[in-house]
Amino acid sequence: MPVDPSLAALLDQVNAGPAPRIIDTDPEVLRAGNRKMGAVLALPEPIEVGSVQDTAVPGPAGRIPLRVYRPERAGPVPTVVFFHGGGWLSGDLDTHDDVTRRMCRDVNAVVVAVDYRLAPEHPFPAAYDDCLAAAHHVADRIDEYGGRRDRLAVAGDSAGGNLAAAVALTFRDEGRPLAAQLLVYPATDFVGDHPSRTENATGYGLGTQDVLDFQHLYAGDDPAVRGSFQVSPLRAGNFTGLAPAVIGTAQYDPLRDEGKAYAAALTDAGVDVFARTYDGLVHAFLNLFPVSPAADAAVTELYARLEERLG
């Protein structure tokens, strides 16, 4: 299937000029570009939810900023701790505001978005440590959030999907099972090679060289670090007892096959998994629902499957 026509013009703009190497570009320039693109793609008016509150909680290196979205529905509801994408280098609470507002509304859950520390200034394990600390904080104080102790989930896209998978593995190892995990085009493997890295190397927004640069800036080159489950969830070895998973990947994405491999590994371990590769879509489709009906339909389905598992 060809690229979704709604995204073709956007890709033409992205591909019109030479793209500088991630590793050779000032991170603040990349972050500014990410924020600018997010503003271009944003909905003209924010999705209405019950309330939105910016706050912060203690972390391993200081306060971790959070944004808490509460649905209009009264009474106890599930809680989702969300980690944004951006290659561990960019992205923030604002770049994913449409994503998290819609999640709050569609899933009828409290959504706690985490503004974790970014590489290269703060390489691994900074982002993982912040995300785990934020998830622990919410789990320990669930009455202050959604209120349903048996309905806590983690979610994330791309680098955030990587962090969500790592946090879910850690919660399993700690004997603190989660109710669900939503992983959208997650990065799961820093040490393996996958056909989609070659098939979708260039021309679809995120390139394979971009992936390699992001990985280097986040986790360096030490094989022991890159192969740890906190960096490469696919290398965890044991997937039994993990939270039910909703995993969405895109046809034209260099990360497609490692996301599919993670879904297969969880399924083989007896985990409840909904997994789908969305034809015609590219990396970052979670943020593209305002401009693409196909992306909108994918987000609708993924959020519905998450809501089912949170009951």
Image (cartoon, helix red, strand yellow):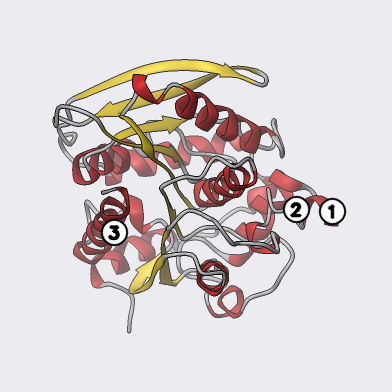
Q: What's the mark number on residue 224?
A: 1
The CA span between labels 1 and 3 is 35 Å
Along the viewing direction, whichever of 21 and 131 lies nearer the viewer: 131
- Report the residue at 48% width, 38% height from top: 91
- Report the residue at 33% width, 50% height from top: 287
Q: Which residue is mark 3?
A: 305
Query: For this view, does 245 lie left or right of residue 239?
Result: left
Q: Residue 120 appears at what percent x and percent y? A: 69, 37
Amino acid on which disc 1 is placed: Ala
Query: For this view, does 68 lie left or right of residue 46?
Result: right
The CA span between labels 3 and 2 is 29 Å
Amino acid on which disc 2 is placed: Ser
Number of numbered markers: 3
Q: Residue 115 appears at what percent x and percent y? A: 49, 29
Name the secondary structure under disc 3.
helix
The CA span between labels 2 and 1 is 6 Å
Q: Which residue is mark 2?
A: 228
